[in-house]
Amino acid sequence: MPETVLNIMIGGEAGQGLVTIGQLLAKSLVRAGYFIVVTQSYQSRIRGGHNTYTIRVSPDEIQASQESVDLLVALDKQTIDLHQDEMSARGLIVVDEAFDRRGDNYVLVPYKQLSPERFANIAGLGVLSVMLGLDGPLVATAMDEFFGKKNEEMVKQNSQVLVGSRAWAEALDKSLARRLPAVTNPQKRLLMNGNEAIALGALSAGVKFLSFYPMSPATSIALTLAAKAEAMGLIVEQAEDEIAAINMALGASYAGATAMVSTSGGGFALMVEGVSLAAMTETPIVIVVAQRPGPATGLPTRTEQGDLEFVLHAGHGEFPKGIFAPGTIEQNFYLTRRAFELAEEYQGPMFVLTDQFMADSYRAVTPFEVADLPAVRPIELQILPKMNYQRYAITESGVSPRLLPGYTKHVIGADSDEHTTDGHLTEDLAVRVQMQDKRYRKLTGLSAEVTPPECRGEEHPDLLLVCWGTTRGAVHEAATRLKTEGRSVGTLHFSQVWPLVPEQFMNHLNGAKQVVAVEGNATGQFARLIRTTTGFHISRQILRYDGLPITPEYILKNLASV
Amino acid sequence: MPETVLNIMIGGEAGQGLVTIGQLLAKSLVRAGYFIVVTQSYQSRIRGGHNTYTIRVSPDEIQASQESVDLLVALDKQTIDLHQDEMSARGLIVVDEAFDRRGDNYVLVPYKQLSPERFANIAGLGVLSVMLGLDGPLVATAMDEFFGKKNEEMVKQNSQVLVGSRAWAEALDKSLARRLPAVTNPQKRLLMNGNEAIALGALSAGVKFLSFYPMSPATSIALTLAAKAEAMGLIVEQAEDEIAAINMALGASYAGATAMVSTSGGGFALMVEGVSLAAMTETPIVIVVAQRPGPATGLPTRTEQGDLEFVLHAGHGEFPKGIFAPGTIEQNFYLTRRAFELAEEYQGPMFVLTDQFMADSYRAVTPFEVADLPAVRPIELQILPKMNYQRYAITESGVSPRLLPGYTKHVIGADSDEHTTDGHLTEDLAVRVQMQDKRYRKLTGLSAEVTPPECRGEEHPDLLLVCWGTTRGAVHEAATRLKTEGRSVGTLHFSQVWPLVPEQFMNHLNGAKQVVAVEGNATGQFARLIRTTTGFHISRQILRYDGLPITPEYILKNLASV
Amino acid sequence: MVSFEGYGNYETAWCPGCGNHAILEALKKALVTAELLPYRVLIVSGIGQAAKSPHYLNVNFFNGLHGRALPAATGAKLANPDLNVIVESGDGCNYGEGGNHFLAAIRRNIDVTLLVHDNQVYGLTKGQASPTTAEGFVTKAQPAGVPSIPFNPVAVATAMQAGFVARGFSGNVDHLSDLIVKAMAHPGFALVDIMQPCVSFNKVNTFAWYKQRCQPVSEDHDPTDWEQAMKVAFTWGDRIPIGVIYHNQRPAFETHFSALKRGPLIKQPVNTTKLAGILESFA
Amino acid sequence: MVSFEGYGNYETAWCPGCGNHAILEALKKALVTAELLPYRVLIVSGIGQAAKSPHYLNVNFFNGLHGRALPAATGAKLANPDLNVIVESGDGCNYGEGGNHFLAAIRRNIDVTLLVHDNQVYGLTKGQASPTTAEGFVTKAQPAGVPSIPFNPVAVATAMQAGFVARGFSGNVDHLSDLIVKAMAHPGFALVDIMQPCVSFNKVNTFAWYKQRCQPVSEDHDPTDWEQAMKVAFTWGDRIPIGVIYHNQRPAFETHFSALKRGPLIKQPVNTTKLAGILESFA
Ligand SMILES: Cc1ncc(C[n+]2csc(CCOP(=O)(O)OP(=O)(O)O)c2C)c(N)n1
Ligand SMILES: Cc1ncc(C[n+]2csc(CCOP(=O)(O)OP(=O)(O)O)c2C)c(N)n1
Ligand code: SF4
Ligand code: SF4
Ligand SMILES: [Mg+2]
Ligand SMILES: [Mg+2]
């Protein structure tokens, strides 16, 4: 879809303000009615290095990022050197005339003339916005909102730079314009990244407590919630470490607060004992794990889908859990809600597994109708329970009646040891078996409520692409392109990766001539999980583990070789 | 094998000295040339409650425990109530005459008359030893050695009690004797439990550093090593927590000490991040995980095989590891050595997975010839490396040349971030892929060195019992009994559970009419692992998760229903 | 009506003669004196002998992980500040595995009463050294004697200006009970480090050893005088002062959260209008 | 021959103007002054901006996990006491995630020099509060201001009678370098808490802020006098004393291990005769 899709990359050093350009441009584009997919690539440092903020934009819905670049805004020379090979045929490179680089595809901007140095990024924004055909007032409004909170003087200067740079750009040769088809009747959409959608989904579910320890790429979930804590009446607490974070959240949940934690792999490693505690005490908790490449510190600011098996098997002892892996911003919102619902319903740990790509990927989404979304069923505090109340009563569903401490005359016990129905520790080995069975029966209920995978395309395709989580967009687009070429293709995307219910997807696997798994890791973890659960062996795999997100191009290129 | 096997259970409250009776009896029996299998069952408390120390004994080799009791030494009434249903047809119950219980199968001991209260356990030992036909001097020597370190007065009193109680027992009716066939030419054997064997195996491998935080059932590994630290020149350090323990061990290993940690599930949960660090920095470490039932604190003094998948997938990011699961005392010794060898060879984390049953199970073992066992290949300190030394050089095997800091002019870098060949952190994504591939290539080497599963019995049996780790003895004995009944049976025991090399065992799985997995957990984790790795689905499973070890009886009883 | 009996009478798994029994009694007395109804009390514990305590009381309890009682208690208190939250656990649990949470709880000043059964040893795991074990103390895990110097929790808490710092002794039940009452009444973090003999594994710091040393702080000790308190806090030897050593009036942690002005978190519905407004800000 | 250049000259990933640059320089100077050959020095770090330091020096380094530098360093020192082991990391790393190890290292008195780049903020993760952040400090994670009181590492270390306690300032390179030399020379645990501006995320405790407050301890301060040292250690406000605040002569942790009497552990072969004897004791 070359004509209607444009991939704009802004590159430079950390601290040069490229994220600001990106954000303002993204906001303007979404308000103009376009769809966007943002990919952020940055290093583990605050200044210097090489970062990019890439916006893929189209009037049609898109969900994937793109490797070839149509418009490269290079804030430093390094950006040119690193990315000029990625330029598409009609690609343009927008640079400072002072860089002393030139060529047919260069747009040389006289930054020095257009702005004082600290506002250079705004000049870039001005030029870009004209090349893309964005209305001046649209961009100006976005900018004013953004800087509005800061000082007035700055707002004034920014706006002068914007006006000036736009004027300069209007005079450019028309061949340098990269106008997208205008959207005639722009829908109102929200500009939101994956982590924000998780935070908002949590708010809509009624989250009341989040404890966390900072860790990329999860931190922005906590920061988003912290910013809304006062308004929404919740507590966000930075803990002394991740162990404290999860134990705090469990204490809060036990005492009645809908609770969550957010972290990344290394921090989650420290929460593993707490996961087991949640299961044993049957305490609801939502755990968000935002993946990045490991082992250990690995590549702290890059993306990977390498922690699926780790999360699935985290915690000593055996117990049921559920794992969501959202593939769109909307899924981040709704499946986070769902995780809260199931955590409360089944009284235990529920996971949302995301990654740096999705965490930082801004997209345009149709506003959620929050008024229609009930908060997660709160425990009825007024209900008068039976005299003989048993917190851990053995039930057919495995779910026992949960009361909160402090609201009835009943005292509520929770124990990390194996315990009797009233929560007291026991060494009765028959009770142990009953309790273990009871807890495991929840898996039946959880399985019955699994969000089924999304199957697209032909029922019996020649090629079925199987994926999970954040690779959804890339896989869908790759499939669409293949179909355009006349190939018979289907896709199967899992937004819930555990439990797996074979009846929901075996006919798709069995019905395809060739099945290929697409995953952002080195060993095909999800394909392995499919095999474990169903026996179906997906031996053909397209894997990526260089820290970058999977793109349609990556899939198409690698399909040739699998 | 009813005539030649006897199951002796000593039961009472914690603090009544039943372990002393058990230990002295076990020592005497082994010195008399018998084979034994000890099963210890105790509660998470220091005094009171109900504990048992059970010795199964035979002149023939045995490797499993037994559920029915032939001789019950009840130090309190509770023991009778709890275990009288377990008595075999010819079973005898040895009790204090003061308990006021009697019957044909009771041996009433006048404890009050035979000993002051605090030596009652010695009186019990005296009576028992006579009933079993053990020589007086044998028992007396064992006792003297045991108490020898403590005060003399006590030794004297003990010996009087022993002599007196033996004299009393000699006068018992012959029908109350439970003499085992004498072993004519007793071999010299060691009395050793699983944890001691792990500690000794580690010593023979040259372990120089163990850091740990106390946790049942792993603690005795550290205590055994601590007791020998001075003699063997190693450092045993109790850390402030498990996180410190593993990071300390990794620091020590990096600096040249052959290092290990020992813990149980909950403590291991806290080490998970460190496991990932070991992989990333390519630092050798042996991690012993002694399993107990979870989730969370669970049943802290009982047994289970519930942490296989947890250990296998522990650590964020993807990296190779190896897991041993010894099934005999000898395997505890030799496979711990092996774990050290492989950890050093492949520079990463190697696991020994045991459980409470094996940890506490004393058995008779043929002495190890330690003089013939070389310590794990130490790094040659004198070797002059190439000028251009690269700690993480990309190699075909994935193994890079390891030097120690401080011994050559080269400086040695280890980094938890993704790094270049000299160990410095990098954001070069191509290097990332090279490094991840390099680390993963070690799996090829590790796979080539896998200790193959042990297959016994017919090549194409009607029934193949598949097991791993500590259930080996029970499975072998169950199979033997079935064979005696004329059934066609084979067994397949895995003492290394990762990596799995299908070529080593697929013919066995495929060759059997029926395959049944026997595991000490609730969900059939190893069977699942077999399916993941080979596609072979072992749907018939005998599982146990009540905290007690799997026994031959348990298998036979449950075979009927699978 | 709050009564001693109302707090139940359970069989314990502790050794006869263990100091834990007396601490349990002192706590029960304190709860009765404070007229707290069982269902309004939450005891959070870790793992260890001391940590079994809440199983022997008719109260709400959260018997969590070894070393992690304080964070769990902090979360519970923040979720529902109406609960009277007590943490009860051992020296190993709180100062060993949980050392980092001890520091954080002091810094936060969360309104939780921390009762540490300080037997200077790991009881449940059979006698290894704890952070408060004396230098040179011999155990099976430290056959050459403990090489580290002991942690003085009272001194560190006072140095860090914890809200309320006291030391008690299991051998002086009434005094201890009184300390617990005061600690619970204190609106902020309150530490009561309780000297407790372990008859099975600590043969040095026995009942007699403590009895001889544990003496009430002098009558004229002013616990609001930090400098004076520091002197008392660092006293450890032939004399071990027991009593309230230090307290201050820092606002409790929970008072900082606007969300809690409207009561326990569970009672606050989601304001969908505000939420809609927030979503709107993303447009 | 030890030279400044021998310690290398690397490009860093730090912000221009960051205090880390000066600390790196001070450390290099100290290493040269102490005449330590690069291959005899091991720097262990955690994760954070400060923790990147060893990548910018030509030394042995173990750049481990966030918060876990001290235990790794302890292990390395025990394995090979001949190494000069330095831990270099941030305030978040050492006093936040690693708080428990900080306490344990002090108690052990392991001969490791701990250099904490104390910028009173989490730099690498973009400006959240650290344990040393002042009460009320506003960040994106603490929009209502930090509700806890700050951790004073120098005070806690002195109170716990750490082997050697000092505070430095990145703005006074020579003074800092001298402190590091002394800390390295101290045979036991040595803390140097270093005040360091973070130009990107700490707009309160700026270079000027520190410059104005950080003043050398008075000439007549006797760091072996614990009571006097306590006074200095607790001074924090308009004046922040820098210099050696306290030290004592406790034997270093490694001296307690008989195994180390024979040198680094790697040099000691397995004594199979003794091992055979041990096995024999199981017969
Ligand atoms: C993570 C973890 N590590 C270790 C243990 C084992 N453990 C149980 S109790 C205990 C020590 C208890 O000592 P203390 O807290 O002083 O309590 P006491 O038994 O002396 O009352 C330990 C180490 C555990 N349960 N969990
Ligand atoms: C277990 C774990 N949790 C969180 C992180 C993320 N993290 C990296 S650096 C850092 C904070 C660094 O602050 P500080 O130690 O003060 O160092 P500075 O960057 O200020 O020098 C955090 C929280 C991590 N790497 N590992
Ligand atoms: S072991 Fe010690 S602390 Fe535990 S119950 Fe017995 S006496 Fe008390
Ligand atoms: S963020 Fe702060 S601490 Fe980090 S390099 Fe920049 S100025 Fe230094
Ligand atoms: Mg204790
Ligand atoms: Mg910092």
Image: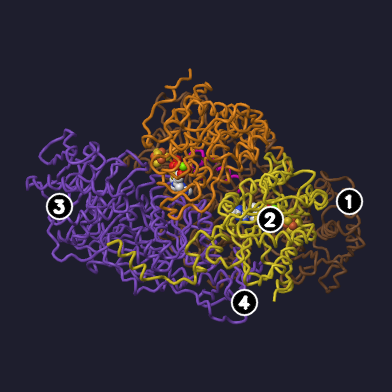
Chain colours: A brown, B purple, C orange, D yellow
Determine the chain carrying the residue at label 4.
B
- The quarter of the displayed image where residue A83 is located: bottom right
Q: Is residue B70 above or below residue C115?
A: below
Q: Chain of mark 1?
A: A
Mark 4 or mark 3, which is nearer the start of the sequence?
Answer: 3
Residue designated by label 4:
B409
Residue B478, percent from left and from top: 22, 57
In contact (CB < 8 Å): disc 2 and disc 3: no
Pointer 1: what residue?
A159
Q: Which residue is mark 3?
A: B132
Q: What's under tag 1, amino acid-wise?
A: Ser
Residue D70 % position (x, y) = 59, 57
Which of discs 1 and 4 lies nearer the camera? The answer is: 4
* Mark 4 crowd level (few <14, some 14–19, many ≥20, 10 Å Cα): some
* Residue C259 as seen in the image, left or right of residue B332: right
Q: Amino acid at mark 4?
A: Lys
Mark 3 vs mark 4: same chain? yes
